[in-house]
Amino acid sequence: EIVMTQSPATLSVSPGERATLSCRASQSVSSNLAWSQQKPGQAPRLLIYGASTRATGIPARFSGSGSGTEFTLTISSLQSEDFAVYYCHQYDNWPPVITFGQGTRLEIK
Amino acid sequence: LLQESGPGLVKPSETLSLTCTVSGASISSADYWGWIRQPPGKGLEWIGSIFHTGSTHYNPSLKTKSRVSISVDTSKNQFSLRLTSVTATDTAVYYCARGLAGFDYWGQGTLVTVSS
């Protein structure tokens, strides 16, 4: 099983600043990685797939990068609605065995 | 839109059964449909996914003990989850979702509590 490790567990950032979240895979997943955002009491929302492709309707301030085992989600200028928990997950295997990271909580500083 | 339905309370050792009804899209489209769960206060866990043809893929941690099965009913535009021999550790919010390379549509989730 591919283990996904996200860091940090909690990130405190001020509105308007940049946030950088990391996700590491225990083995290469190529670019088969997605990022989702989850707010309290809500279902997750897909932000990024294919490591760097924004999902439909996702603002340009969200960007993804990386390949292989190291990935980054960057939020260029934090808005109040961006404070949430962010999860990465990989879908590299075939047959698929999808694994999620443990999440990064982005909180207001 | 996706909507989960099923009992909110299941007794230990019994079977958890949930259905996801898909509206606004055909389940027979070229895509996967899946189940993901989230224990209270914890992270997300993929349970498994199904293609409209019935081809399934499961999380090995659940498949090993043959506890999980996912089925599809294209005539009703629904897919279903069945999890046998539940314990308290199966208490979670269960989500249905579309996709595999990123889940782009999710249901609102339904809390299933395992308790006697």
Image (tube, rainbow, N blue to C red):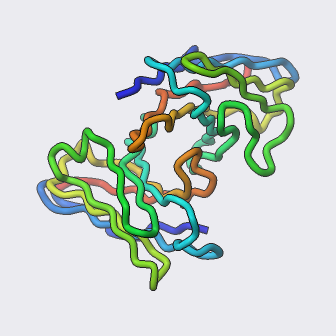
Quadrant of the rendering where the N terminus of chain B is positioned: bottom right
Displayed quadrant of residue A94: top left
Query: Up-down: is A13 above or below B32?
Result: above
Q: Residue at x 69, y 16 (%)?
A: A12
Task: Tell me: B104 left or right of A74.
Answer: left
Percent x, y of residue A89: 52, 34
Q: Can the viewer see residue B108? A: no
Q: Residue at x 57, y 34 (%)?
A: A32
Percent x, y of residue B35: 42, 54
Q: Can the viewer see residue A13? A: yes
Displayed quadrant of residue B115: bottom left
Seen as rendered, the residue at the extreme bottom is B75
Query: Up-down: is A30 above or below B37?
Result: above
Q: Residue at x 53, y 18 (%)?
A: A24
Task: Tell me: A2 left or right of B106.
Answer: left
- Say which of B53 and A59 sits in front: B53
- Say which of B25 and A93 sits in front: A93
Query: Up-down: is B61 above or below B72?
Result: above
Task: Tell me: B47 left or right of A75.
Answer: left
